[in-house]
Amino acid sequence: MMRTGEVNANLRECNDSLGSDRLGWINDLISQKIAGEEQSIVGGNDRLLYEREYRRYRALLVREGEASKLPQTPTAEFELRALLARIRDVGSVAA
C-alpha cells in the first residue's frame, strides 16, 4: 500500500509485488495456514529465519514509510464517516 496507495489483502500478490525483496518462504506459511498447521510451534532454524526476516522487513517498512507519498494523517475521514453512515442506514432499512 505504501508503494501503490492501493489496498490489497492477497498476501501472495503483495509478496510478488516486492520483486527482489519478496519473502521466499511466505508461500510455505500460507500453505501451512490453509492446511490447518498454523498452530505448530516454530523452533530451531525456522525461528532464527523468521526473527531475521522480521528485523529485515521491519527496516524495509520504515524505509518505505519514509519514502511513501501517502499523507501522514488521514485525508478522507469525513468521506469514510459518511460511507459508514450510509451503510448503517441501508442495514437498518433491511432489518
Image: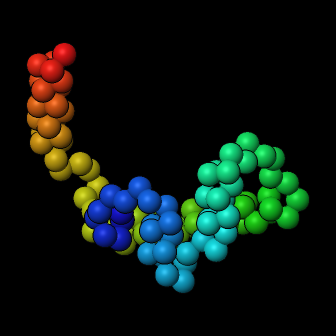
Residue 52 location (% of width, % of height): 72, 66
x%, y% of residue 30?
61, 58
What residue is shown at x 37% (from left), y 59% (from top)? 8
| Among the 4 quarters of the image, the one containing residue 44 | bottom right
Q: Is residue 6 left or right of residue 20?
A: left
Residue 93 visible at all = yes
Vertical relation: 76 (above or below) 66: above
Q: Residue at x 80, y 52 (%)?
A: 42
In this rendering, the answer to whether 13 lies above or below 75 is below
* Residue at point 80%, 62% (across, down): 46
Residue 77 x %, y %: 18, 41
Placement of the C terminus among the 4 image quadrants: top left
Q: Nearer the viewer, residue 1 or 93?
A: 93
Q: Judge by depth and name the residue closer to the eye, 15 or 37.
A: 37
73 relative to 45 in the view: left or right: left
Q: Is residue 54 visible?
A: no
Q: Extreme bottom residue here?
A: 20
Quarter holding the N terminus? bottom left
The image position of residue 12, as x and y in percent, is: 50, 66
Asked whether 43 or 63 is in front, the reply is 43
Q: Quick one: 64 or 86, which is closer to the camera?
A: 86
Residue beneath the point at 76% across and 66% down? 49
